[in-house]
Amino acid sequence: MSRAKWKGPNINLPLIQNIFLHEKKTKIWSRNSVIPSILINKQVLVYNGKIFKPVFITREKVGFKFGEFSFTRSKGKKKVTRNAKLTKKPNK
């Protein structure tokens, strides 16, 4: 279920205060906050649960949430099947 339109976007207030006070890259822990328009052409660091990933904010990203651009899961390892092991050619 989405947030009601009459409530407005969910923006973390300390996030906005931090942006105006510091010119360096801002670290963001709240992935559910909406990206405000004051961040256009700036780079922020979004926490994905393990590390901070850099996200460059463009006009198209305004209105989306920070979590949509910082993925939490990796691709993982490829599963090797038994047939793939048997068909490998030996090195000469």
Image: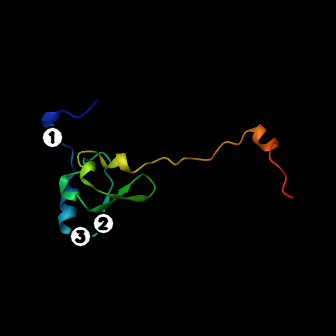
Residue, x 19% and y 68% (percent of image)?
A: 21
Question: Residue visible at 41% across and 52% down?
Answer: 48
Q: Quadrant of residue 40?
A: bottom left
Q: Is residue 65 above or below residue 17?
A: above
Q: Earlier in the sequence, mark 2 or mark 1?
A: 1
**Horizontal and vertical percent position of residue 37:** 19, 53
Residue 70, position as x, y percentages in the image: 39, 51
Left or right placement of residue 1 versus residue 86 in this view: left
Tell me which amino acid carries mark 3: Glu
Q: Measuring 54% from the left and 47% from the top, which residue is drawn there?
A: 75
- Type of residue at label 1? Gly
Classify residue 43 as left or right of residue 12.
right
Is 46 placed above or below 68 here? below
The residue beneath circle 1 is 8
Tell me the tag on residue 25.
Answer: 2
Does the CB distance between marks 2 and 1 fall below 8 Å?
A: no
Element class at badge 3: loop
Secondary structure beneath label 1: loop
Q: Which image quarter is the N terminus in?
A: top left
Total marks placed: 3
Residue 3 lies, in percent from the top left, at 22, 34
Looking at the image, residue 45 sits to the left or right of residue 2; the answer is right
State the separation of the CA atoms marked 2 and 3: 7 Å
Could you tell whether 22 is left or right of 88 in the image? left
Crowding near the residue tagged with mark 2, few <14, some 14–19, many ≥20 C-alpha atoms within 10 Å: some
Question: Cα distance, mark 1 to mark 3?
Answer: 27 Å
As helix, strand or loop, the secondary structure at mark 2 comes to: loop
Q: Outermost residue, top direction?
A: 1
Q: What amino acid type should be assigned to the residue bearing mark 2?
A: Lys
* Residue that badge 3 annotates: 23
